[in-house]
Image (tube, rainbow, N blue to C red):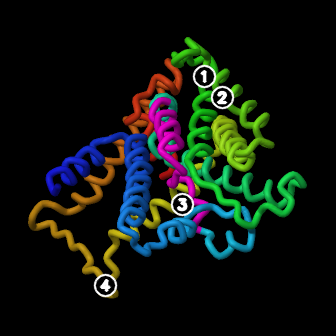
Amino acid sequence: MARIIDELIRNFRSESVVGKFIYANVAIYLVVAVVTVLSTLFGLNVPVKTFVSFFELPASLQQLLCHPWSLLSYMFLHGGLTHILWNMVALYYFGKIFLSFYSTRHFVGVYLFGGIMGGIFYVAAYNLLPFFSGEANGAYLVGASAAVLAVVMAAAMRNPSYRINLFLFGTMRLITVAIVTVLASLLLSTSSNAGGNIAHLGGAFAGWAFAYMLNKGWDLTKGINAVIDFFANLSTRKFTFKRKPKMKFTSASGCKHSADYEYNARKKEQSEDIDKILDKVKKSGYSSLSDDEKRRLFDASNR
């Protein structure tokens, strides 16, 4: 068992960001499903559904105020095997396409931004539209569909003519797939899964807004990634009230000003590297960059 867990951890670490999100979704689904099955088989009084409901997104504003974290957690929960299967297949397929146009940080931001906007659309619909009048209490949303659709729409906006091969449908343009999915969600917004389809529209809007604003020079995912970076740094930061000793440089060793020299050398090397990437963009376009080049360009723009 320990060997299997170690292998899974190694695979997780070696995966792309798309693979990591798929691993996270599947792991959460399996834990909830296994605990539910075992508690049922052995007649254990384990309130699994009650516990999970704390992480589902409630349509009721009052309940949402009590569980604000559910605006994030709901997109990592799924209602059944078919539900998570379709979402993860779509995430894998379109996530790889997304990464050919954007960076890893963009993927993280768009996924979360799409899920959040999907949740906002869902809650707003249940509290503002007459069709949902009186149904907010007891209504909950789960699933990564809105986040996945944000990824699809952002990729389609970046390269509308990109052609993909879909089983049973043949070759289609990426923008066509995005538009058909949005229209289907709109037409089904009064069906039995009305709230879920409205959440899809929120995710699609997030993907469109990201791509449109990025083209204007505004990165809507910067704030989300800044929050993630803050908590990531917080987990590794050592809190201490001791004053750090000042570094001293002496000429006796011949190392005086070596720190300044090394710093300037690094800055020059980084500047030359960015200039080469910008020249490549000018000649061949942004899509010609590798994932690593996109990441370095994005990091440089944030410094």
Question: Would residue 223 be seen by someone viewing this image from the given angle?
Answer: yes
N-terminal of the pair, mark 1 or mark 3, is: 3
Report the amino acid beneath label 3.
Answer: Ser
Task: Give the residue pinned by disc 3.
Answer: 73
- Marks 4 and 3 in Cβ contact (< 8 Å): no
Nearest to the observer: residue 43 or residue 4: 43
Mark-to-mark CA distance, 4 and 3: 39 Å
**Quick one: label 2, few (<14), some, or many (20+) residues within 10 Å?**
many
Task: Give the residue pinned by disc 1.
Answer: 174
- Local secondary structure at mark 1: helix
- Local secondary structure at mark 2: helix
- Local secondary structure at mark 4: loop
N-terminal of the pair, mark 4 or mark 3, is: 3
Q: Nearer the viewer, mark 4 or mark 3?
A: 3
- Marks 3 and 2 in Cβ contact (< 8 Å): no
Asked if residue 4 lies left or right of residue 263, the reply is left
Query: In the rendering, which numbered label is found on residue 178?
Result: 2
Region rendered in magenta: 69-93
Q: In the image, residue 270 lies at what x, y percent?
A: 37, 42
Report the amino acid beneath label 4.
Answer: Arg
Q: Residue at x 51, y 40 (%)?
A: 82
Query: In the rendering, which numbered label is found on residue 56?
Result: none
Question: Would residue 298 be seen by someone viewing this image from the given angle?
Answer: no
Q: Residue at x 86, y 59 (%)?
A: 133
Asked if residue 223 lies left or right of residue 133, the reply is left
